[in-house]
Amino acid sequence: MTEKGSSFKGVSVVSCGTLRMELTKLQKEGFLDADKILFTTPGLHEVCSELKEQVMRQVKRALDVSERVIVVYGSLCYVDPVDMSGLDKLLEVFGRNVLRIRAQNCVDALADRQKREEIAAGRKVFWLTPGWMRFRDLVFKDWDIGKINENFPKNDVAIVLDAIGYYDKLMEEDPMKILEYSDWMHLGVEAYRVTLERLKGLLLDKLKELKK
């Protein structure tokens, strides 16, 4: 349930689809009682033009429902290759009633740098979220063996920041999928259980700003 003064009524959310499962959980738990939650296709950080088009379209749809919108995207998810401007610059056209959470990407939205350093314990980690596993074909669309070998094996391990029990459920119901994912990455894959408290805090910070 939402705490007093923390209701998201009158606000809609636009998010990258990689965090669909986490936001859906917050919605089911009663914390995120937003008017509407709209998602873009997962993995668009590698296709900037499509990311821009989908985010802008979904924000416009959200504004048809609510006066205020929170955008769940990171500062590193979109960089215009021409003028190097980021997503915040794009969102300025909508005014101060559309704000983006203060995070670098979906991984950072689940665990900040200090927490990740604690989890890594000196290891070089390729960070994942449940959405990066579930939507692998979209997030890593068109990755060939060369790109895979360039990005994954230089790490010591891949760690899934799991706040929804996705990894444990997959291990119980279809462990071969985890083994197949590991083989594909040429890297061991393990999970670290986190909470949704950081994501909740990021959302509440923007809610407070919008209500000023």
Image: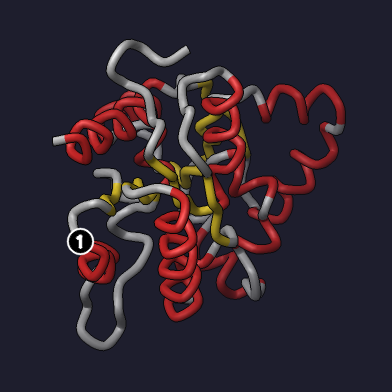
* Image quadrant where residue 90 sits: bottom left
Q: How is the image coloured?
A: secondary structure
| Location of residue 124 with respect to 149 vertically, above or below | above
Q: 65 or 4: nearer the eye?
A: 65
- Say above or below: 86 vs 108: below
User: Image point 58% across, 28% down: which residue?
Assistant: 191
Q: Residue 17: percent from the left, percent from the top?
A: 57, 52
Across and down, in percent, residue 126 comes to 47, 47
Looking at the image, the residue that sits furthest to the left is 212
Q: Quadrant of residue 95?
A: bottom left
Residue 161 at x, y percent in the picture:
50, 32
Quarter placement of the C terminus:
top left
Residue in view at x 24 percent, y 44 percent: 102
Q: Nearer the viewer, residue 172 or 9?
A: 9
User: Could you classify mark 1 by the number of other residues whose Cα lies within 10 Å: few (under 14), some (14-19), or many (20 or more)?
Assistant: few
Say which residue appears at 50% left-offset and 53% top-offset.
16
- Identify which residue, 160 or 48, lies in the foreground: 48
Q: Nearer the viewer, residue 103 or 8?
A: 8
Residue 144: percent from the left, percent from the top?
Answer: 65, 74
Q: Which residue lies at the image location 28% right of the left edge and 53% below the top edge?
A: 98
**Is label 1 in a helix, a strand or a loop?**
loop
Callout 1 amino acid:
Gly
Residue 34 vs 4, above or below: the answer is: below
Looking at the image, residue 39 sits to the left or right of residue 79; the answer is right
How many numbered marks are there?
Answer: 1
Q: Which residue is mark 1?
A: 95
